Image (tube, rainbow, N blue to C red):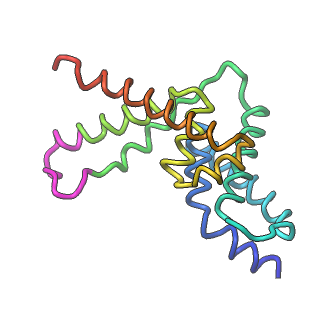
Amino acid sequence: MLAARFAEVVLPHLGDALSLARWLTGNQADAEDVVQEACLKAHAGIAGFSGGNPRAWLLTIVRNASYTWMAKNRPRSVVAVGDLADLDDVSPPPGSDADSPEAALVAKANSAAVEAAIAGLPQAFRETLVLRDINGLSYREIAAMLGVPQGTVMSRLARARGLLMTELGGRHHEPA
């Protein structure tokens, strides 16, 4: 019975869990370790899941597992900037000149710039931005997950987006 509940509650959201862990840890291999640990914790606590949003519940576990894992496995001076190997899978948007090597190079460069800009955000802003804009959680869910008021979530999100726009906007105005 617990296995069926685990499959129903946790398994549909593993992709989102891995995505969040990758953004928080900075690379795929560490994210996989974190998600494995989070799944063990979710399995152990599945009986205590009382309903609500299973995705937010799992992502809360992943977030906590990420910070616990990083505290154990990384010195405080290490700053993760992302796993650029993931950019190899970037595909251009439909309707663009997808066959052009130049278009592929521009798409990779743009993705690398966005990923680097997100990775360079202060932790609280990066976390809020990823939870909202990448994982699609509501302000209320993020506030509950982080233990902060909704206004703080909105403020952090606005600041994160502003910092991203400043960082990425500066790149577009550089001479070619």
Of 74 and 129, the residue lying toward us: 129
Q: Quadrant of residue 84?
A: top left
Residue 100 drawn at (x, y percent)? 13, 46
Q: Quadrant of the N terminus?
A: bottom right
Residue 6 drawn at (x, y percent)? 74, 72
What residue is drawn where x is 79% and y is 33%?
A: 72
Q: Does residue 30 lie above or below 71 as drawn?
A: below
Q: Does residue 57 lie above or below 160 as drawn?
A: below
What residue is drawn where x is 16% and y is 52%?
A: 96
Residue 115 drawn at (x, y percent)? 43, 36
Residue sitting at the far bottom: 1
Q: Is residue 125 left or right of residue 149?
A: left
User: Which residues are drawn in magenta?
Assistant: 92-105
Q: Quadrant of the C terminus?
A: top left
Residue 89 drawn at (x, y percent)? 37, 50
Q: Does residue 53 lie above or below 132 as drawn?
A: below
Residue 21 on the magenta span: no
What residue is drawn where x is 72% and y is 35%?
A: 70
Q: Does residue 135 lie above or below 119 as drawn?
A: below
Q: Is residue 53 left or right of residue 1?
A: left
Residue 94 on the magenta span: yes
Of 96 and 143, the residue lying toward us: 143
What residue is drawn where x is 75% and y is 39%?
A: 69
Q: Secondary structure of the magenta portion, mostly?
A: loop
Q: How many marks?
A: 0
